[in-house]
Amino acid sequence: MPYRTSLAAALAVAAPLALGACSNMTAQQQSTLSGGAIGAGAGAAGAAITGGVPAAGAAIGGAAGAAAGFLKEELREPR
């Protein structure tokens, strides 16, 4: 099986499981997790493009994204 086909099959199986795991989280937990994931992806991509170490970029971006997601919900006006 070619690599792309294997990757697509793995994502097709993993995506619904990952999305279902967020159903019992609070808004703050979801925002923190989303921010961390987006930050990690952006950090890894940015490091790879600029010639840095993608793992370090992912770690720094993930931490910054998680903090931003947490603060977004923490500082939100009460409804």
Image (cartoon, rainbow, N blue to C red):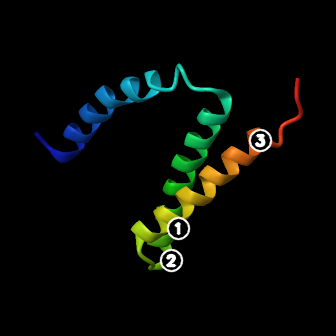
Q: Mark 1 points at which residue?
A: 46
As drawn, the label of residue 50 is 2
Hey, what amino acid is under mark 2? Thr
Residue in the picture at 60% in, 50% down: 66
* Percent coordinates x, y for residue 18 in the rendering: 41, 29
Q: Which of marks 1 and 3 is nearer the N terminus?
A: 1
Tell me if residue 15 comes above or below residue 3 in the rendering: above
C-alpha span from label 1 to label 3: 28 Å
Tell me if residue 15 comes above or below residue 67 in the rendering: above
Q: Name the residue under label 3.
A: 74
Residue in the picture at 40% in, 67% down: 55
Q: Are marks 2 and 1 in contact (CB under 8 Å)?
A: yes
Residue in the picture at 74% in, 47% down: 71
Q: Is residue 15 left or right of residue 38?
A: left
Out of 74 and 7, give the one closest to the viewer.
Answer: 74
* Percent coordinates x, y for residue 65 in the rendering: 61, 53
Q: In which quarter of the image is residue 73?
A: top right
